Image (tube, grey):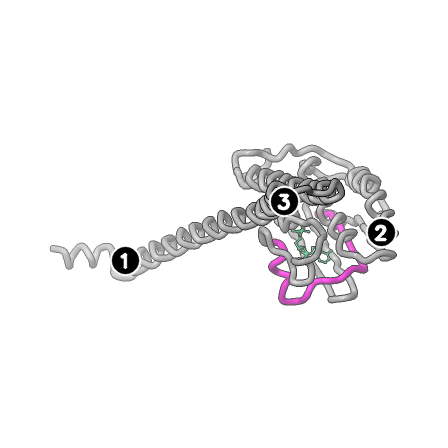
Amino acid sequence: QLDQKVDVVGKDEIAELGNAFNHMAEQLQRVEQSRQEFVSNVSHELKTPLSSIKVLTESLIFQENVPVEMYKEFFTDINSEVDRLNNIISDLLTLVRLDQREVPLNINTVNLNDVTQGILKRLIPLAKKKEIKLIYESHKDITAEIDEVKFTLAISNLIENAIKYTPNGGEVKVIIQSDLQDVFITVKDTGIGIAKEEQSKIFERFYRTDKTRNRETGGTGLGLAITYKTIVMHNGAIVVESEEGEGSTFVIQIPLRHVWEGGTR
Ligand code: ADP
């Protein structure tokens, strides 16, 4: 009786079903593993500034006759650690919100030249501090269907990074172009660059390159993860080209018209 049933379903089908189950189990395991990694990364990233705060406060508490200058110095350090905690938490909240699939994009037809120029204007003081030349290039008005708030954050992250990882006196160039289907936004800097083997990792949460990990640039390692996620939600793509010591170029491509999952809305 049983043999007959097996024949009806077919041995191949059973094997296929078995493979599908194994594949699903592997995928679930991978999801669980990356969730655990994320939680452990978050804990580590939050613990580092907390440990510094603890050391600083304890040395003030347990030391007799602390000079006023020392109070000032330590409180300034504590203040920047608190800023760091704040930055990490607000970046995490942004990522968690982007991860919630039920939070929809607020799509509108937006002039990208205006959006980008607005971002650049806001970043002028940051660039000025490092005497970095900010260049904007566009030959026509380009409008696209995007979530302006999320998109602004994604592009800001790229331009802020370009400024942050470019030594004084360098140059950051933003170019907007389009063809019939897509818009291309290029952010090019003359900065420190990214090693070939690290270029695919920089979009991962908390990843910071060897060169920048110990440097006091104040980054959270979450900015590019936010940018990547946002671009994918816009059905777009992001690529990086970089040469160490020469500079980096990030190019974002997104469709001019937004395609909703499961059809146009
Ligand atoms: P962070 O907050 O550290 O800047 P991001 O997620 O924005 O985090 O970037 C991840 C890492 O990628 C950075 O720590 C830095 O090592 C590297 N990176 C990003 N943009 C650039 C750039 N324009 N030039 C060189 N390195 C960059």
Is 201 in the magenta? Answer: yes
Question: Within 10 angstroms of label 3, few (less than 14), some, or many (20 or more) residues?
Answer: few
Where, quadrant-wise, is the C terminus in this rendering? top right
C-alpha distance separating marks 1 and 2:
65 Å
C-alpha distance separating marks 3 and 1:
73 Å
**Magenta part of the protein: which range?**
181-203
State the SS at label 2: loop
- Pick whichever of labels 3 and 1 is earlier in the sequence: 1
Question: Within 10 angstroms of label 1, few (less than 14), some, or many (20 or more) residues?
Answer: few
Up-down: is 148 above or below 139? Answer: above
State the SS at label 3: loop
Instruction: Please name the residue that numbered disc 1 is placed on.
Output: 14
Q: 43 or 254: which is nearer to us?
A: 43
Q: Residue at x 52, y 38 (%)?
A: 101
Up-down: is 58 above or below 1? Answer: above
| Residue 158 x %, y % | 72, 49
Instruction: Please name the residue that numbered disc 2 is placed on.
Output: 130
Q: Residue at x 38, y 53 (%)?
A: 24
Instruction: Please name the residue that numbered disc 3 is placed on.
Output: 63
Question: Within 10 angstroms of label 2, few (less than 14), some, or many (20 or more) residues?
Answer: some
- Pick whichever of labels 1 and 2 is earlier in the sequence: 1
Left or right: 55, with 122 as reference point: left
The outermost residue toward the front is 65
State the SS at label 1: helix
C-alpha distance separating marks 3 and 2:
39 Å
Q: Is residue 78 visible?
A: yes
